[in-house]
Amino acid sequence: MIRNNCFQFTLYLLISLLFATCNSQNNNNTSNANSNAELLKVKNDDEAQLRAVLNNYHSGFDKNNAELIRKTIADDYIMFNGNYSDDPSDWQAHQFLHKTAVDEWIDMMITEVSPIENVYEINNINIYNNAAIVVTIETGKNNFRTWKNEKVTYLFGKVGADWKMVGFFLKDMKNPD
């Protein structure tokens, strides 16, 4: 009888432990699911904000609105060209702008390069912590050149709670001789 009671008690403990473990695992899965859902929400919010920044950047050029463009760009901004090559050893630094130089570049783009006509489609968004790239396929023209199905890579950094454009790469462009 005692042996039977010990067996039953041991069985009861094992079953209790099994249920406790399963319940704990379910709670962890729920916790992980909640964490994953929160991460997905943050990612979706970040992607939406990146899309909005890119849209404002292009809208600013469409409307010759320097203030709208400036709101999308960080105080430091770098541009480089692919020199029509996939080989990074052929790529070229174009220019680095800091604070007021960003404003001067925007003014030059509006006064000398405009009108800018550009249609773009987002091809890819990649976010890692406070950095992001957005790749677009663009077709358009300005006073100096025409482009069709050009891939443009925009670089972004999160400044506080806001995404700002910190640079771009144009593969199908080269520096003037």
Image: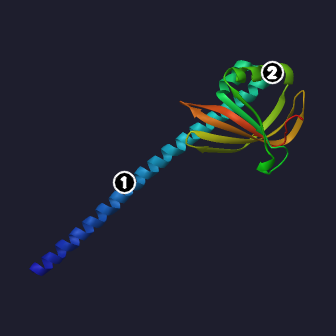
What count of labels does the image hold? 2
Q: Nearer the viewer, residue 139 or 6?
A: 139
**In the rendering, at what x and y percent does residue 102 appear?**
71, 24
The quarter of the displayed image where residue 114 is located = top right
**In the rendering, at what x and y percent does residue 27 appear?**
37, 54
Q: Give the number of the disc on residue 108.
A: 2
Q: Nearer the viewer, residue 153 or 78?
A: 78
Amino acid type for the residue under numbered disc 1: Asn
Look at the image and tell me in which quarter the N terminus lies: bottom left
Q: Nearer the viewer, residue 156 or 57?
A: 156
**Residue 114 visible, this orientation:** no
Amino acid type for the residue under numbered disc 2: Met
Q: Is residue 35 left or right of residue 174?
A: left
Q: Residue at x 66, y 29 (%)?
A: 76
**Residue 153 visible, this orientation:** yes
Q: Tag 2: Cα neighbours inside 10 Å, few (<14), some, or many (≥20)? A: few
Q: Earlier in the sequence, mark 1 or mark 2?
A: 1
**In the rendering, at what x and y percent does residue 54 appear?**
70, 32
Residue at the disc numbered 1: 27
Q: Residue at x 59, y 37 (%)?
A: 46
